């Protein structure tokens, strides 16, 4: 963990990524892609090392980059088929990130979601896991808010939807892609590095981006948020 300067504005709202922060889907996506792409690279560790840094990007982008890196020409419809298979597995094996429900319940700030997934999938996941009432209609994704992360559009839309400037928001992210978007939007970012999908050295990479602090246990999140709110 590392702490940066005291926030410039009072922090009054919380904006969270979904996959890998609320829903424990990134580990499922990683496992599913490892199996689907094994015909192209038998060494799972090497393949995982290629996939992990790309998690947080739109799934179709991840797959396209992987095929390009492996110098494999995808058959017609292959990327879409793999992507649909990954999404089905994530939906089938849906679960919360350990401790996140209790952590969010302890944080009284108004909340929004900023995700690179599709809005319908995010809403369905939040409903199935019981988190939907915490966020209401404040769900922002590229299909309703513009460009995907690492562009800051979904974070800017989340702040606008909450009726505040981005500088009043704390963002929770698990990926470099998402953290880059939240930092670019002007939010104070906390990086969750406790997921099994998170690559080694993530804390240092997040620090270099300008993330305020990292944590690996959701039980620590309420105290981190409380400290930031008091400092502001």
Image (cartoon, rainbow, N blue to C red):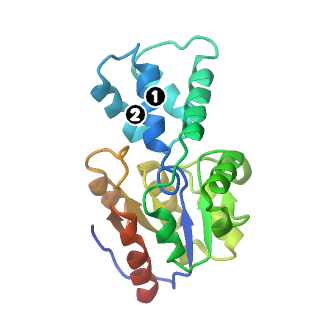
Image coordinates for residue 75, horizontal then vertical, percent: 58, 11
Residue 4 image offset from top left, x and y in percent: 32, 74
Percent position of residue 109, x then y: 57, 79
Q: Hey, which quadrant is residue 213 in on the image?
A: bottom left
Q: Is residue 76 above or below residue 156?
A: above
Residue 43 point in image, percent of width and height: 29, 20
| Residue at 46% across, 28% down | 33
Label 2 neighbour load within 10 Å: few <14, some 14-19, many 20+: many
Left/right of residue 167 with respect to residue 209 in the rendered view: right
Q: Could you tell me which residue is drawn at 63 percent across and 69 percent down?
A: 134
- The vertical placement of 131 against 6, above or below, is above
How far is disc 2 from disc 1 in space, using C-alphas?
8 Å
- Check disc 1 and report its element: helix, strand or loop: helix
Residue at 46% of width from left, 38% of height from top? Answer: 28
Is residue 142 depicted above or below 100 in this figure?
above
Nearest the viewer among 102 and 226 is 102
**Against 222, is 145 above or below?**
above
> In this rendering, would 231 be left or right of 169?
left
Q: Residues within 10 Å of mark 1 (few under 14, many from 20)?
A: many
**Quarter assignment of residue 168:** bottom right
* Camera-side mark, 2 or 1: 1
In the rendered structure, the answer to whether residue 180 lies left or right of residue 160 reads left
Q: Are marks 2 and 1 in contact (CB under 8 Å)?
A: yes
Circle 2 SS class = helix
Q: Earlier in the sequence, mark 2 or mark 1?
A: 1
Query: Where is mark 1, residue-wise?
Result: 33
Q: Which residue is mark 2?
A: 51
Q: Residue at x 51, y 65 (%)?
A: 101
The reply to whether residue 55 is in sight is: no
Q: Quadrant of the C terminus?
A: bottom left
Frontmost residue, 194 versus 186: 194
């Amino acid at each position: 963990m590392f702490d940066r300067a005291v926030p410039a504005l009072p922090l009054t709202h919380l904006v969270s990524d979904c996959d890998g922060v609320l829903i424990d889907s990134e580990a499922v996506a990683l496992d599913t892609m490892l199996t689907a792409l094994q015909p192209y690279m038998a060494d799972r560790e090497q393949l995982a090392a290629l996939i992990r840094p790309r998690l947080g990007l739109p799934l179709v982008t991840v797959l396209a980059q992987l095929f390009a890196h492996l110098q494999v020409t995808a058959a017609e419809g292959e990327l879409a088929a793999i992507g649909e298979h990954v999404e089905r597995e994530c939906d089938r094996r849906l679960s919360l990130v350990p401790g996140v429900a209790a952590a969010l319940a302890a944080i009284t700030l108004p909340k929004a979601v900023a995700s690179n997934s599709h809005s319908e999938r995010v809403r369905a996941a939040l409903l199935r896991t019981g988190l939907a009432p915490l966020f209401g209609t404040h769900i922002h994704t590229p299909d309703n808010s513009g460009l995907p992360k690492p562009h800051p559009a979904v974070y800017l839309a989340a702040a606008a939807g909450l009726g505040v400037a981005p500088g009043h928001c704390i963002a929770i992210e698990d990926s470099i892609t998402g953290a880059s978007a939240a930092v670019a939007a002007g939010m104070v970012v906390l990086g969750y590095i406790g997921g099994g999908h998170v690559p080694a050295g993530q804390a240092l990479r997040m620090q270099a981006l300008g993330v305020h602090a990292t944590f690996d246990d959701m039980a620590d999140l309420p105290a981190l948020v409380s400290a930031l709110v008091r400092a502001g």
